[in-house]
Amino acid sequence: MSMLKWTVRLLMLLSIMGLLSGCWDNKDINHRTLPLILGVSLQDHEYKIIMQIPELVHDSVEIKMISESGKTINQAIDKISVNLEKQVDLLHIKVIILERKLAERGMKDAISGFMRSEEISDKAYIVICDEDLNSFFEHLNKTNDPKGMTLYNFFEKNAGWNPQIAISPIWQVYRSVHSYTRDVAIPMIKAGKSTICDYTGSAVIKNGKMIERISPDETLLFNAFNEQSTQGKIEVMNHASVLVVSNSLKHTTSLQNNKPYMQSRLKLKVVILETRGNPTSAIIKQEIDKLLTERFQRLFSKIQKSKADIFGIGQHFRNKIPREELVRWRTDYFPNLQLSLKIVTDIQNEGYLKIRAD
Amino acid sequence: MDKSHYVMLMYLIMHLGLIFFMYPENIIASTDAVHWIAIVSGLAVQFIFIAIYMKGLNFFPGKDIIAIYGSAGLGVSLVFLVPIVLYFLMINIITVRAYSEIISIVFLANTPLWAIMILLMLVSTYIAAKGVETIFRTGLLLGLLFLPMILLIFLASFQNVDWNYVFPLYENDFTFWTRPTFYQSFFAFAGSFLFLGFVRTHFPYKDNKVYLTVLSLVPFFIFSVYVPVLTFGQNTASTLHFPYVVVIDTLQINWLIFDRITMFFLFTLITFIMLFTSLILWMTSRIVSCCKPSIKQMYYTQGLAVVIYILCLLVPDWKKVETLFTWNAPLRFYCLIAIPLSVYYLGLRSRRKMRHEHA
């Protein structure tokens, strides 16, 4: 009896080994292809997608470009998967490039699709391509980066990112589609002459639609306003060029007669890099102030005209405007907003050379 | 001997497993702003009934809830224990079905549901069949292994919050009372505390420590709702299934080797859920085995597991799972309200009787 019992137990234990394979319909890594970059454009009411797929040729990796079109993005991907000997796996998509035409037409559905999918990470960056997507990818293909990581590193904070580049992961774009008070700026790139890509500024997105564009310098202010670090950006004035080392921001808001007012104080710490002539630190501070204030005013009036609150200013009025009213923030309140920005500059150090105080 | 730490840990694990999935979604759906009022009022109700329940149990030292009802007569036992059995069966069906669907949505898209469910059921049935000591010891093990990780991920989830979304802090809006989703949110805490009455003979505990555990869970309840709201805003968060899990998906931690923390978070919580289902299964079989005590409790556990599995297979889609939540509501409130009150009442009565006998 006990012999039988033990045999049964042993068999049961052994059968558990069958579970060790872990996954259902598991496909080995060599039967999957893991693209890092996905390009999407719109062609006569059909999505066209382009992917870079790494391929092993004689012990070295080569990047192949594959494109297909379909009514939905997933249909196009599926078509690629059908025609490929491997399964396309989007788990590692890091950057999604959308053609400008698609962004201008509205990308609500595309973004919702990315959000819905469990395969594509919500952290993947959305980028807008400022030219024809095909020619951009052809250019991208000429670079001999074996891993195809170039474009991802371009936006990665601990790699090639610079403070004048906007960063917009999928979830932030999705948030702007539904939020009352928050819009987003998406970086725009095109093929560069000597470098891989050329950063041409950012697209202002309102409810998933591109409505305006801002320059790289203006994007810097956008980043500063959203309390991203602007460390490392070099500002050039008439008499000096300085390096921004840190920035901080404070707001006070008020609402009078249903008109919103906001006072902001941007505090910059800079280091002097080069001077022209013999300026005093007071002159340098004045010049920074003038340069940034003018740039900010230009940017702000542009944003206000387009009624897209990429600064998230409405956020600061959440405790002043009731929710039912906040729905109309973009149309009723934001265009009337009075914003005054005060820039305070500290010169943290001037390097090895002395500078006169005044 | 005081074995409070086992009970505390079990209480924590059960609730952590339940909080982060449906609870935020239900609360966000039940109110547009000032979520904390909905959260706190739900928790206050829970706290009151736990207090009544424990006070009631204290009238009967060394007796578990089955013995308490048993001593009051067959009629009383039937009126109170049958709904508990039904409720526990429902809980088990819903958790196994819902969590297998969550697993399939989040990471095992190709695996058929029956396979996921069979694995979930197999593990929990095995633990449950080994008895309550095994369940609590497994709880200790899981707590030591996974609680630090859960805490870390919980803290990391504040990465993208924008505190401006907290406002408005107060609004005179109590319409959440009328929304069914508010009552669905009770799933995360109502009824599961009944285990305190089942295990007190095996694991004696101090009431104060249980209160402490209940209070220490409050921040988790509050922030499981507020983290998605603060990250996305109410309007966006209300469009999401499992908003907290989506927030975990947006986290970027550069120094971690793994790109997606969501997987770890889910694996951890699913082990908690397995333990939760095994405890519920054990309690159900404990009651059912009173019908015919000559059969070993283990066989009841296995039989019930098969019944639960078959019923789980009959639920075709997510919409039906949500309907089950609604159907379950009357039983949930019966267990939340009637059981503690009845235990308390029986306790008062038995004390009066004792005094009479002494006098």
Image (tube, coloured by chain):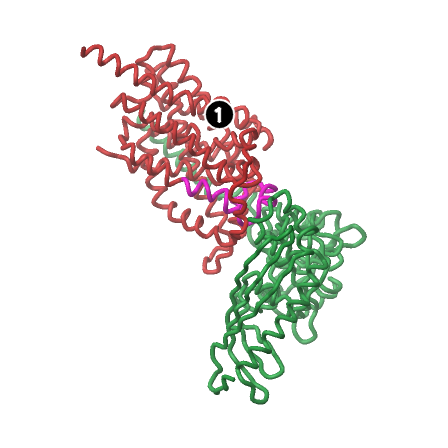
For residue A154, above or below residue A94: below
Q: Residue furthest left?
A: B358
Secondary element type, mark 1: helix
Q: Nearer the viewer, residue B175 or B162?
A: B175
The residue closer to the viewer here, B92 or A229, is A229
Quickly name the residue at label 1: B90
> Dot 1, crowdedness within 10 Å: few (<14), some or many (≥20)?
many
- In the image, is residue A210 above or below residue A78? below
A72 left or right, relative to B111: right
Q: Image point 70% across, 47% down: which residue?
A: A109
Q: What type of secondary structure mainly makes up the magenta span? A: helix
* Chain A shade in the render: green
Work out which quarter of the rendered image holds the N terminus of chain B and state it: top left
Is residue B221 shown in magenta?
A: yes
Q: For the residue marked with disc 1, what is the amino acid?
A: Met
The vertical placement of A139 against A10, above or below, is below
Which of the 4 image quadrants contains residue B40? top left
Q: Residue furthest right?
A: A44
Identify which residue is drawn at 34% across, 20% down: B343
Displayed quadrant of residue B271: top left
Count of marks overlaid on the render: 1
The quarter of the displayed image where residue B313 is located: top right
Residues A79 and B134: in front is B134
Q: Chain of mark 1?
A: B
Q: Is residue A249 left or right of residue A151?
A: left
Where B158 sits versus A267, above or below? above
Percent x, y for residue B134?
Answer: 32, 33
In the rendered picture, chain B carries what hue? red
Percent of width and height locating residue A68: 73, 54
Q: Is residue A145 visible?
A: yes
Q: Which residues are magenta?
A: B218-245
